[in-house]
Amino acid sequence: MAEAIFKALLLVIATTAFATTEAALGQRVPCYFVFGDSVFDNGNNNVLNTSAKVNYSPYGIDFARGPTGRFSNGRNIPDIIAELMRFSDYIPPFTGASPEQAHIGINYASGGGGIREETSQHLGEIISFKKQIKNHRSMIMTAKVPEEKLNKCLYTINIGSNDYLNNYFMPAPYMTNKNFSFDEYADSLIRSYRSYLKSLYVLGARKVAVFGVSKLGCTPRMIASHGGGNGCAAEVNKAVEPFNKNLKALVYEFNRDFADAKFTFVDIFSGQSPFAFFMLGFRVTDKSCCTVKPGEELCATNEPVCPVQRRYVYWDNVHSTEAANMVVAKAAYAGLITSPYSLSWLARL
């Protein structure tokens, strides 16, 4: 895996965004739909009554459009994937998008969103995975997007982290950690995930990249709350492992049971090692780049940030920097962390 991540570094160096020559060649896929949580959210939470919103400085400090609601200093993973897929612009958020945008692509992701409906409820309004799919159904039906076109579109999903961060490993009002073992909870989440993926399949999704959960125990937030402030929280990472294992199996299940399904699993967890981060140029892996107040996870408004953002893995206490996002997106595109298909291969199928 370390060798694979090192190869990803070469891709990061060699690839440039929105190359004019590539743009002239046209999109690799006719449309692109995004589902998930804050890792993928690009502004849907801005209009919600929630504390899970980041439409303020210093978020977007390295993004040409400033603070848009992306939980990073710059581009997020779907932004970079859109570039690699040769879209002329980033996929816009569902909030404010017209139905006609469904012919090109929409980002439905919501910070705090989870597989379970109650996940992140303490933060305020959140768009769960179930509601995101409902929004997608409404948009493509209203826009009358042909099914044969939907079959050729790219779909990326990043969901599940909040079901651990803002549910299982949170105190009251959440009771899941008292009712489920690690394996039982993972099984419960996957049962729901299976149902939601089937709904997307019925709605025309065939080329689907499902992102696994990262090493949540190594985020600055969980190091502080569950790791004693001294290294990754092993218990948290152990809890995530059965979810990722079962999610990968679910991807292969869809490919086996549906002849036209081309689903792929994106493994973020396995590549998160100190050696890999060092080889990729990161020097700070356990602290946030921006100023985060004690007990919080998001950046404090207009407070100082680290001088060299690209050396940090984490922008705030949970979310990654643009540099880390770029490594993941390009490694997934090249197939270095995917199974069985790379994103580039999905586009060709």
Image: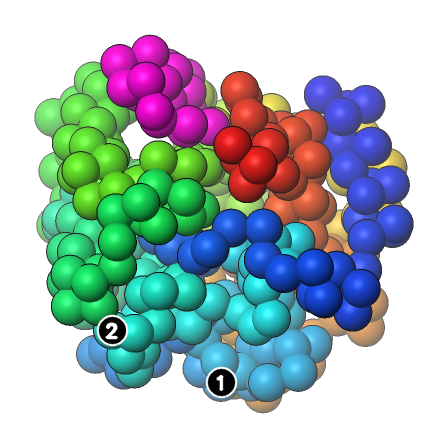
Closest to the observer, 259 or 250: 259
Q: Is residue 194 above or below residue 57?
A: above
State which region is magenta: 243-264
Q: Position of residue 225 (x, y in %)?
A: 44, 46
Residue at image position (58%, 57%) is 27
Closest to the observer, 319 or 44: 44
Occupied quadrant, residue 322: bottom right
Residue at image position (17%, 25%) is 191
Q: Residue 56 has which mark?
A: 1
The mark nearer the N terminus, 2 or 1, is 1
Q: Position of residue 345 (x, y in %)?
A: 60, 32
Q: Is 191 within the magenta?
A: no
Q: Is 255 within the magenta?
A: yes
Q: Is residue 137 above or below residue 218?
A: below
Q: Residue 99 has which mark?
A: 2
Of helix, strand and loop, which mostly describes the magenta segment? helix
Q: Residue 228 has which mark?
A: none
